[in-house]
């Protein structure tokens, strides 16, 4: 038998999916889900209407691209068809000739990584832009005019596509697994996890398990918000344990991002499997950045752990064209596949029906308390899932990889808005309570939290 046979299958499917342009919506997502359907026939494609309200958000118009390029002297110098990262995701249509100065205002590159094309999005504000290697950007002639062409369209009556797999076990209680499908041509973030989970579904569809399995393939943030908006009641009723899987194919150590209070059954299971390895990482919830944010949000309160290898934002290829097929191999992919199998098998082996999700209060038992005027100011988030901060001008509308300190405080205030005091939030974040309170006042003014003292 060929070594890493399962890994070879996964790698081959990733290679097939790699060129497809994916985003929050569009034909690329549907095409990708249909390819994953060939691995697991149980995968259903669910369509959510553009413009539909889901908690504090609206599903965006469906976006598709036929072509996009920049020409100089009749020669294409940036070409979407050669690499779909060249186009800022959700760019509006353009067809004009412009000066270098105007073009340069719409270009994105990374000085630190001059040979990499960055991944940039502008989902919720209409604009256009191109991404290219910084070394090529520096060589553009300032005296020339440039022909810019983007053949894209927005369907207001379009849809957002989500993949769902349900595998029934003896019990109606479910193990929830989720991953993201909205990234274009990047392998570790995000093609490895969806393909691995499709093969995991195929594996468990052939054997009997105690717990049922729910596997979701979601556009990041808006996908999980839309799915929870429609299915939260049934998910909460049947929830046994939950794991979001991302950046799961590189050579880094297996790692996890804990749930918000680091005391759920999902945490216990993930840690037990991690400890079977000589090296592993356990990150605090404050390091969150994917759909674990929505699952753990006040009002949702699904204790979902994130499983990863090198954490998003921490490998140099992250959100660039260097996150390509060379970042993984069949050996790594098979190890990642086996890791997920072990997680699911452990939950099924410990097949007690009772839920072991402990009270958040225990999280503060060992915190050293220094009395301050912020002890009695408790924070309650007023939305289910994250609020749409961009429409309130509280958050940027062009993607970047890192949060500012104020953004970090703002998001975590919302995450911990379970009636926890500002003093306790400050202790969790290791930030002065006065700085927490300053951001809390902004959120309170925008009616996103309620302060009770």
Image: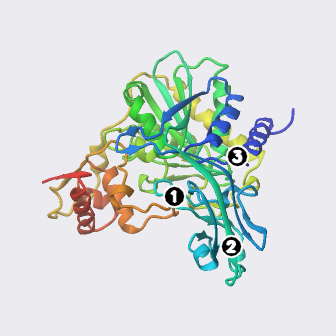
Estimate the spatial distance between the alpha carbons at disc 3 and disc 1, rounded to whole Å. Answer: 19 Å
The reply to whether dot 3 and dot 2 touch (C-beta < 8 Å) is no
Q: Nearer the viewer, residue 111 or 349?
A: 111
**Mark nearer the N terminus (1 vs 2):** 1
Q: Position of residue 240 (x, y in %)?
A: 44, 29
Q: Nearer the viewer, residue 134 or 415?
A: 134
Within 10 Å of the Cα at label 1, are there few (<14), some (14-19), or many (20+) other Cα atoms?
A: some
**Mark nearer the N terminus (3 vs 1):** 3
Residue, disc 1? 122
Residue, disc 2? 146
Residue 209 vs 425, above or below: the answer is above
Q: Position of residue 358 (x, y in %)?
A: 34, 37
Q: Nearer the viewer, residue 151 or 290?
A: 151
Q: Position of residue 102 (x, y in %)?
A: 58, 75
Residue, disc 3? 20
- Residue at the extreme right of the image, as rendered: 1
């Amino acid at each position: 038998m060929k070594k890493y046979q399962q890994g070879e299958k996964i790698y081959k499917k990733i290679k097939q999916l790699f060129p497809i342009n994916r985003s929050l919506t569009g034909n690329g997502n549907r095409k990708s889900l249909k390819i994953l359907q060939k691995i697991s026939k149980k995968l259903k494609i669910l369509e959510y209407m553009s413009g539909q309200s889901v908690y504090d958000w609206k599903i965006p118009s469906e976006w598709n691209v036929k072509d996009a390029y920049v020409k100089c002297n009749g020669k294409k110098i940036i070409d979407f068809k050669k690499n779909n990262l060249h186009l800022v995701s959700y760019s509006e249509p353009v067809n004009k000739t412009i000066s270098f100065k105007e073009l340069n205002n719409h270009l994105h590159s990374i000085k630190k990584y001059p040979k990499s094309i960055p991944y940039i999005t502008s989902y919720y504000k209409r604009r256009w832009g191109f991404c290219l290697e910084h070394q090529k950007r520096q060589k553009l002639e300032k005296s020339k005019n440039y022909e810019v062409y983007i053949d894209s369209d927005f369907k207001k009556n379009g849809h957002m596509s989500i993949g769902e797999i349900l595998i029934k076990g003896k019990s109606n209680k479910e193990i929830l697994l989720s991953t993201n499908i909205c990234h274009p041509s990047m392998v570790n973030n995000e093609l490895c996890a969806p393909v691995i989970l499709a093969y995991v579904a195929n594996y468990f569809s052939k054997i009997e398990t105690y717990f049922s399995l729910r596997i979701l393939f979601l556009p990041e943030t808006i996908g999980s918000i839309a799915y929870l908006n429609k299915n939260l009641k049934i998910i909460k009723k049947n929830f046994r344990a939950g794991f979001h899987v991302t950046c799961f194919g590189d050579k880094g150590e297996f790692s996890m991002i804990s749930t918000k209070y680091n005391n759920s059954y999902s945490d216990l299971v993930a840690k037990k499997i991690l400890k079977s390895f000589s090296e592993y990482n356990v990150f605090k919830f404050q390091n969150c950045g994917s759909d674990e944010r929505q699952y753990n949000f006040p009002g949702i309160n699904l204790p979902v752990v994130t499983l990863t290898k090198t954490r998003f934002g921490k490998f140099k290829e992250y959100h660039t064209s260097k996150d390509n097929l060379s970042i993984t191999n069949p050996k790594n992919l098979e190890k990642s596949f086996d890791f997920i199998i072990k997680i699911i098998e452990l939950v099924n082996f410990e097949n007690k029906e009772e839920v072991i999700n402990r009270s958040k209060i225990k999280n503060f038992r060992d915190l050293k308390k220094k009395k301050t005027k912020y002890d009695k100011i408790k924070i309650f988030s007023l939305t289910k899932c994250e609020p749409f901060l961009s429409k309130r001008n509280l958050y940027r509308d062009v993607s970047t990889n890192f949060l500012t300190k104020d953004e970090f405080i703002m998001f975590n205030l919302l995450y911990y808005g379970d009636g926890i005091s500002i003093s306790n939030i400050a202790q969790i974040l290791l930030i002065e309570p006065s700085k927490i309170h300053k951001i809390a006042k902004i959120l309170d003014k925008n009616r996103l939290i309620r302060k009770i003292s």
